Image (tube, grey):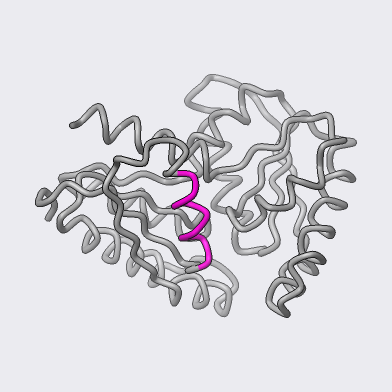
Amino acid sequence: MGGGSGELVMVHTVAGLIDLFDELRAEIDPEVPVRHVVQAALLTDAIDEGGLTDEIRARTCRALLEATEGAALVLCTCSTVGPGADDAAAQADVPILRVDRPMAEAAVTAGRRITVAATLATTIGPTADLVADAARRAGKEVEIDSVVLAEARARLVAGDAEGHERIIADGLREAAASADAIVLAQASMTPALDRCADIQVPLLTSPRSGLEAAIARYRAAA
């Protein structure tokens, strides 16, 4: 599968991220043709199951392979199902990238003590594994800690965006006391950064770095 019109296809599990990535695309390179695909059930099922099961991972792989139709490159924007993107990348004839890989690579250059922060417990494992893989590839030893800000997720589901951002910012502020860098494991956490100007350690997010890497790869292929 693949080829066709040569779009950059983004596969999301949260429809609300489309606007965020469209805004970033407009800043980085508005000429790149983009198509969005939403596969919300992959994330909701992973939450229900308490993590990424083999079955959900296989479904993710199939969904990303299907997304290669008409694509020059596919970007998976969900960290929870990221391992399924790795599986698809090994089978596809167009690049399939994980949005959080550049963030993980940046984290291992920032210091030895890395904290992975999330509002969903299901996201911690895949992101921590990705950071560990980036460290191995870079030949570095790191200590990976994690923090789950579950109450922030509950506020977001309830429609309280302000509360969601405040709880994340407070949690990141506390985590910064014992970290050289903090990785925000979910793109949906990014708006909280507006409340974090006082935090001195790097706060690394995936949307911009992941999309920049995808667009660079897209342009190189073009």
Specify the quadrant that holds the N terminus.
bottom left
Residues shaded magenta: 16-24
Depicted 51 relative to depicted 129: above or below: below
Q: Is residue 55 left or right of residue 154?
A: left
Closer to us: 78 or 220: 220
Question: Residue 169, relative to residue 154: is it above or below?
Answer: above
Q: Is residue 207 magenta?
A: no
Q: Quadrant of residue 175?
A: top right
Q: Where is residue 133? Give x, y as percent.
A: 51, 35
For residue 40, side relative to residue 90 (left or right): right
Which quadrant of the figure contains the C terminus?
A: top left
Q: Nearer the viewer, residue 217 or 53?
A: 217
Task: Count the marks.
Answer: 0
Please report the residue visible at 42 percent of the width from the left and 46 percent of the height from the top.
Answer: 98
The overriding secondary structure of the stretch rendered in magenta is helix
**Quadrant of the rendered image containing residue 132:** top right
Please tell me which residue is depicted at 28% across the width and 48% down the height of the picture: 8
Q: Position of residue 41 (x, y in %)?
A: 44, 77
Task: Report x, y in % for residue 116.
Answer: 69, 46
**Is residue 154 rendered to the left or right of residue 167?**
left
Horizontal and vertical percent position of residue 155: 77, 73
Q: Quick check: 195 left or right of 20?
A: right
| Residue at left offset 90%, top offset 36% | 177
Q: Residue at x 89, y 45 (%)?
A: 174
Asked if the magenta segment contains residue 23, the reply would be yes
Up/down of 135 relative to 206, above or below: above
